[in-house]
Image (cartoon, grey):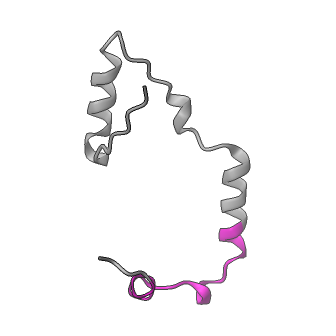
């Protein structure tokens, strides 16, 4: 069985400690590790992007339809 929870960032550490204290739940913290190859791709993209290509939040928000 797999259960997905949406934990607020400010409650994450508390929730993780609580879950770790329960002996019938397995916590595999490696599931949260970002592989080095993926980090490299992001770093390369950041390095190759020029500041004049950046979009403001207002510009990005206008491109999405919320509703």
Taking the magenta stretch, the answer to whether it contains residue 62 is yes
Residue 40, percent across and down? 72, 55
Q: Nearer the viewer, residue 46 or 26?
A: 26
Taking the magenta stretch, the answer to whether it contains residue 53 is yes
The outermost residue toward the top is 23
Residue at (66% x, 52% y) in the render: 39
Figure check: 11 above or below 58: above
The C terminus is located in which quarter?
A: bottom left
Is 30 placed left or right of 62 in the picture? right
Is 28 placed left or right of 8 in the picture? right
Figure check: 43 above or below 53: above
Is 9 placed left or right of 32 in the picture? left
Total numbered circles: 0
Q: Nearer the viewer, residue 4 or 15?
A: 4
Q: Nearer the viewer, residue 22 or 67?
A: 67
Q: Which residues are magenta?
A: 45-63
The outermost residue toward the front is 1
Q: Quadrant of residue 5?
A: top left
The N terminus is located in which quarter?
A: top left
Residue 8, percent across and down? 28, 47
């Amino acid at each position: 069985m797999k259960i997905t929870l949406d934990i607020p960032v400010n409650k994450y550490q508390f929730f993780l400690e609580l879950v770790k204290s329960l002996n019938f739940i397995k916590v595999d913290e490696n599931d949260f590790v970002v592989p080095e190859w993926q980090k490299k791709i992001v770093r390369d993209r950041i390095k190759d992007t020029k500041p004049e290509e950046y979009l403001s939040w207002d510009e990005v928000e206008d491109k999405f339809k919320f509703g």
